[in-house]
Image (cartoon, helix red, strand yellow):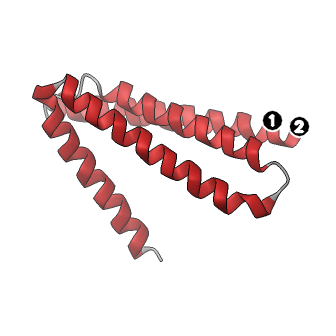
């Protein structure tokens, strides 16, 4: 791996760590303190899971593409599809293991995903 790639991955990892810490702590405070949601106890772990999967997919994508930009589109689409399946599997397993929180958790995630898609659609 080139020194530029190592520097990029280090900067990306630091950014993901800072954003994850802010979202995990803010979400824990908001969900646990203000909204009294049952998902509050596991929210930091869910945030950490999403960050680790995102970081792993990004590292894999950077290594695979390397210096070949013509492979980027296929690799990017494949990695995003894989990431969505990993998240879906996580949601289903979580909903089956924690049945009391599962329905509310899936409902909240559904609305977050819908909101993000609307933001992306409206910004085009």
Q: CA distance from mark 2 to mark 1?
A: 5 Å
**Mark 2, secondary structure of its residue:** helix
Q: Is residue 88 left or right of residue 67?
A: left
Q: Which residue is nearer to you in this view: 16 or 63?
A: 63
Q: Residue 43 at what x, y percent from top left?
A: 31, 29
> From this viewpoint, which residue is outermost toward the left?
100
Residue under numbered circle 2: 3
Q: Is residue 16 left or right of residue 96?
A: right
The quadrant holding residue 33 is top left
Q: Which residue is nearer to you in this view: 55 or 123?
A: 55
The quadrant holding residue 106 is top left
Q: Which mark is residue 79?
A: none
Q: Is residue 65 left or right of residue 108?
A: right
Q: Which residue is nearer to you in this view: 1 or 75?
A: 75
The quadrant holding residue 16 is top right
Q: Is residue 103 left or right of residue 73?
A: left
Q: Residue at point 59% right, 36% down?
A: 55
Note whether 43 is above or below 5 in the view shown. above
Q: Residue at point 37% right, 25% down?
A: 45
Q: Residue at point 51% right, 35% down?
A: 53
Q: Residue at point 67% right, 39% down?
A: 60
Crowding near the residue tagged with mark 2, few <14, some 14–19, many ≥20 C-alpha atoms within 10 Å: few
> From this viewpoint, which residue is outermost toward the right?
2
Question: Which quadrant of the figure contains the N terminus?
Answer: top right
Circles 2 and 1: CB distance less than 8 Å? yes
Residue under numbered circle 1: 6
Q: Residue 112 at what x, y percent from top left?
A: 29, 52
How many numbered badges does the structure rendering display? 2
**Mark 1, secondary structure of its residue:** helix
Note whether 117 is above or below 8 in the view shown. below
Q: Residue 42 at what x, y percent from top left?
A: 28, 24
Q: Residue 116 at what x, y percent from top left?
A: 36, 59
């Amino acid at each position: 791996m080139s020194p530029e790639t190592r520097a990029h991955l280090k900067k990306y990892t630091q950014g993901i760590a800072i954003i994850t810490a802010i979202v995990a702590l803010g979400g824990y405070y908001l969900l646990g303190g203000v909204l009294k949601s049952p998902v509050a106890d596991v929210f930091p772990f869910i945030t950490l899971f999403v960050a680790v999967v995102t970081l792993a997919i990004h590292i894999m994508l950077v290594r695979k593409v390397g210096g070949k930009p013509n492979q980027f589109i296929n690799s990017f689409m494949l990695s995003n599809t894989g990431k969505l399946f990993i998240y879906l599997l996580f949601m289903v397993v979580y909903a089956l293991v924690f049945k009391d929180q599962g329905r509310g958790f899936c409902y909240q995630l559904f609305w977050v995903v819908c909101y993000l898609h609307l933001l992306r659609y409206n910004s085009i």
